[in-house]
Structures are given as structure tokens and as C-alpha cells.
Image (cartoon, rainbow, N blue to C red):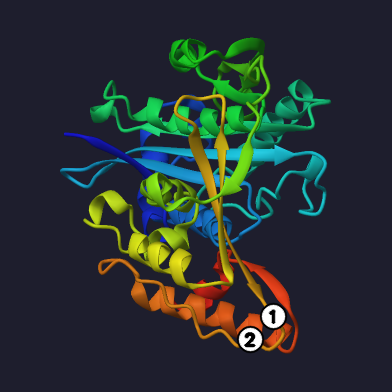
Amino acid sequence: MPLTLQPVLAPDLPAAHRLNLSTNHHTEPNKTIFPNGASDTTVQYFVDLTRKQLYDPESRVRHMQVRDTETGEMVSYAMWMFFDNHKRDKGGKDGEEKTGLDSFPADANVEAMRVMFARSTEKKDEVMKGVDAYAYLGILVTHPSHRRRGAATLLLNWGLHLADLHHLPTYLESTPAALPLYQSHGFIPITPFPIPLHPFGTPLTITHTCLIRPPPSTPPPPITISPFLTNPDLASFPLIEDAAFTDSPILRQVFPPSSSTGPDPRLGTILSTTATDPHAVYLKAFLPSSSPPTIIAFAKWLFYPSDYRPGVYKPPFPPHGNQALGHWAFEKIFEARERLMAGRAYAFCQRSINYSKAKEKGF
């Protein structure tokens, strides 16, 4: 039964939070905070909290899942956060996003939840004091019947790859049972984190461990930019685009992974555009130090004179993707572009749509 790594979309949120709450309900902290376990009230609270993050294009929170491809069951779930303490425009401490914990599930132990979440944040701030930017693994959970299949490792490696790409350290708190997994991936124990439960009626003190995985010892390799060449670069385009779309719940609906669509319809469009459109320029970024050079990014730029009136760009959307969402998105991009740039010469780099507007349209 193979596993597949994919982003958590809005319809997946109830299953993700139910998996997290039910799997961890045997632990003393979770039993104290959520005495009713994965109740509908508590699950809906976390669904509402995290749905906002999915549709916020500036959110630095990423929700990922692993599913069994044969049964379709969600077997593992992770929440990664990427903090930048230079950015203070989100209203959170040290540039972090607001936790949303200004309200609580009606059936939770509110005081225990408030105190434990606050202590966890304070401990993280203490350990990471002076670190400008870092990755943080907030949740990593696997269904008990699917453990030792590599699902947690897929989710762990996904976030660590991003952290390494941006040369970031990674922070997390671990239970004693999970310590070997994290240490095998380069995490170093920094300090114990005692969690006293006595104030909440449980005569125990649970001890977690704060760990840090340092960034790579060498900086990222240099990147070179050059014009896109139709062959052999073309074959890499869908793979790069699919990897980028993994983080976008909306674009993932419009463009499902190319491996599941047969011949990729985007390739024909690129071929015809590079050959016939004098306004379009494709660029590639690659690592020249690898052999053969590894292409890591593509960009499409359009350069329009003041008297040019482009039509609405309608790329060929995969037949089993959300074509209605795709057509609406590209029409809105075109309308905004024409409204702002009419009568001017301008350059345009195609980008993704605003997630919140797509939500308003019911997609």
C-alpha cells in the first residue's frame, strides 16, 4: 500500500484534526486539556482556526498530510511553521503569526489549554532567542495502525528540506517516545521542558525535550539564471510547477499532479508560446554545480507595449482539475491587469491568485 505526500486542503481539515486529537488522547497533557478527546466541538474549533491559514497567501503555516493511495485514508498529519522575526506586520510576538487562541473550545479545559499553550510558546521563545528566522514543527502525528511505514519521515523530511533550502535552524518539542526519530534526523536535545499537571487535577509532571536541528554547515549552492530552452528543459517544467503548487491549496485543485493526468497539457502551450509569442520570455534558475545542472525554478515574463491589448490567457487546465476555478482566476488576473495598466507599457510576471477571493466565490 504506497503512501503519497500532499497538502491539506479545506475538506481535509476535519480528518487532520480528528487524527491529531484522537491519536494523542492517551497522553496526560491532552487528556487534561481535551477531556472529551476528538469531540465535534473541539475538531470544529481547530478547523475554523486553520482554515484561515489555508486561504491567507501571506501565512507561514503549512499543513501537510500523508495518505494511503489504495484506501484514501489519511495516515499522518503535520503542521509546519516558518517564522521570520524581522517581520512584525502580522501582529504576533517576534513576528510570529497570531495563534488565534483568543477563544477556546467550549468542552476543553480552558485554563489548562491557556496555560500550557502559553508555556510552550514561552519556552520556544526562550530557546530561540536571538534567532532571526527558523522552522518549527508544531504537530507530527501518525495513526497507530500505520506506524513504521515511513509516513512521519515523509512529513519530517518535507519541512527539513525547506528549512535547509533557506538555511534555517529547526525547533520542536518532543515526547520521550519520539526522541529517537528526531535525533536520527540531526536534532540535538537542548533542554528539558517540564509540564506540571498538578494545577489541573492530575498529580503528574510530564517532561518533554526541546530540540534544535542546526542549518546546513555550508551555504546553499550558487544559482544561475538563463533563458529557458525548449529541449531538454521542457520535461522539468511540470515537475517544478507541481512542487510549487504543493503549498497552494487553490492551485493544487486547478492543476493536479502531472503524474496523474497522462500527457501534460501545459507542455504544448509552452512550446507554442515560446515559438510564437514575441512578448513572452521564459527563464530558468539552475544549480550549475550539479551534473547535469539541476533546474530548480521557472518564470514567465510578459513585456507589453502601450498599444497592446492581450486577450484573456486561458491555459489548458487538466480535465479532472477544477476548471471553473482556473478560468475564474485567470479572468480576474486579466481584469485587474487591464484596469491598472491600460495605456501603459509594462512587464508582467504571472503569479497566483489571492486565496481569500477564491473562497468568496465558493471554490
Say which residue appears at 63% left-offset and 86% top-offset. Answer: 308
Q: Which residue is mark 1?
A: 305
Residue 205 image point, x, y percent = 59, 16
Task: Name the side, left or right, on which 212 lies relative to 48.
Answer: right
What's the distance in space between the residues labelled 2 and 1, CA to CA?
A: 6 Å
Badge 1 amino acid: Pro
Sort mark 1 into few (<14), some (14-19) or many (20+) by Cα contacts within 10 Å.
few
Q: Residue at x 52, y 33 (%)?
A: 159
Q: Amino acid at mark 2?
A: Tyr
Q: Quadrant of the C terminus?
A: bottom left
Of residues 144 and 282, which is closer to you in this image?
282
Q: Quadrant of residue 86?
A: top right
Image coordinates for residue 18, horizontal then vertical, percent:
38, 46
Instruction: Report x, y in % for residue 307.
Output: 68, 89
Judge left or right: residue 251 versus residue 82.
left
**Front one among 208 and 206:** 208
Circle 2 Cα neighbour tier, 10 Å, few/some/many (<14 / 14–19 / ≥20): few
Q: Which residue is mark 2?
A: 308
Query: In the structure shown, which secondary structural element does the residue marked by tag 1 occupy?
Result: loop
User: Mark 2 near mark 1, Cβ–Cβ under 8 Å?
Assistant: yes
In this rendering, the answer to whether 323 lies above or below 129 is below
Task: Check the picture and name the quadrant holding the N terminus.
Answer: top left
Q: Position of residue 153 (x, y in %)?
A: 39, 25
Name the foreground residue: 307 vs 238.
307
Q: Secondary structure at mark 2?
A: loop
